[in-house]
Image: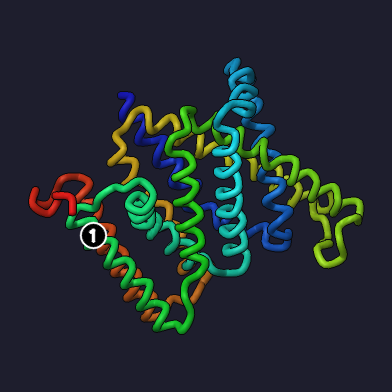
Amino acid sequence: MSEQAKGLIAMVGVCLIWGLSPLFYHTLAAVPVAEVLAHRTLWSLVLFLGILGYQGRLSEFRVALTGPYFWRLVFAAVTISANWGLFIWAVQAGHVVQSSLGYYIFPLVAVVMGIVLFKERLTVTQGVAVALAALAVLILTWGLGVAPWISIGLAISFGLYGVAKKALPMGPVLSVACEVAILTPLAALWLILQATGLMPAALLQPVSFGTHLGETLLLVFSGVVTAVPLILFSYATRRIGMATVGLMQYLNPTLQFFCAVAIFGETFTGWHMIAFTMIWTALAIYSASALGLVPAALRRRT
């Protein structure tokens, strides 16, 4: 099997895990979001440290945590934690349609962030795609009478995470290990305060870990669900082109959308249909531009 074929298989694995992850977090619906997030952080760190130890890279880990990129890692840790927490809450609260929309519009939000933060310029087709996506969100807001805040929050938080990662001179396994290490003291403190009953009454919640065997095992396994796709992603990006990686990423929200409508039975109105059709059209335009499938005149920078 060629290295490219191995990369494609790894990328399919990434998208399957991320896209079907609502099924996993739906089984943890009875566990408070903060507890799920805390255990996801702790068990991810355990797994990442094991991998880095096996690779003989623990010294790199220590240097990265104390090096000049520490505050960028902190920002990355905060934004990805916000993204994880919002996604888990959306699944538990029955808003997977909104979460899938958020990951559909993320590439277009990333384009806008590139313009605002890095002075990048749009091509004509990219401008059309972004405008169409923005119009889709406005139409959905008008039709439903409320903005899709979950979608917007997921897209922006993941976009800001991408901004933080843009200039980090380290691979995804090392950088994510540092991020979860930064979050671990907060996660451990939260769990200790909950377990000992010392949490303020307004925040005190029943603890599931150690109480119910099934939920305990799932909470431990959340580290695998977090770490494995990132490792596969790192493997895949070394073997296939970034255009292929970008296009395959759309499998993630497509599977989330399938879970929402076909499995969870979430409401999908006519307004959703209009908005999603516009988003899919915008992504098709954006992808065609990225692959060079549109006339050169439409690929010029504005």
Q: Inspect the image, locate mark 1, and give the three-letter code of the amino acid beneath it.
A: Gly
- Provide the residue designation for mark 1: 127
Q: Is residue 97 left or right of residue 118?
A: right
Q: Camera-side residue: 278 or 128?
A: 128
Outermost residue on the top side: it is 56
Based on the displayed image, in which of its 4 quarters is residue 85 positioned? bottom right
How many residues crowd mark 1 within 10 Å: few (<14), some (14–19), many (20+)? many
Image label count: 1
Quadrant including the N terminus: top left
Colour scheme shown: rainbow
Instruction: Give coordinates of residue 194: x percent, y percent.
Output: 84, 54
Residue at left offset 31%, top offset 72%: 135
Can you see residue 1?
no
Q: In the visual, does 229 lie left or right of 197?
A: left
Residue 69 seen in the current view = yes
Q: Quadrant of the C terminus?
A: bottom left
**68 in relation to 30, above or below:** above
Residue 210: x %, y % from top left: 83, 48
Indicate the position of residue 54 as horizontal and vertical percent values.
Answer: 61, 18
Q: Is residue 156 left or right of residue 73?
A: left
Q: Residue at x 33, y 68 (%)?
A: 134
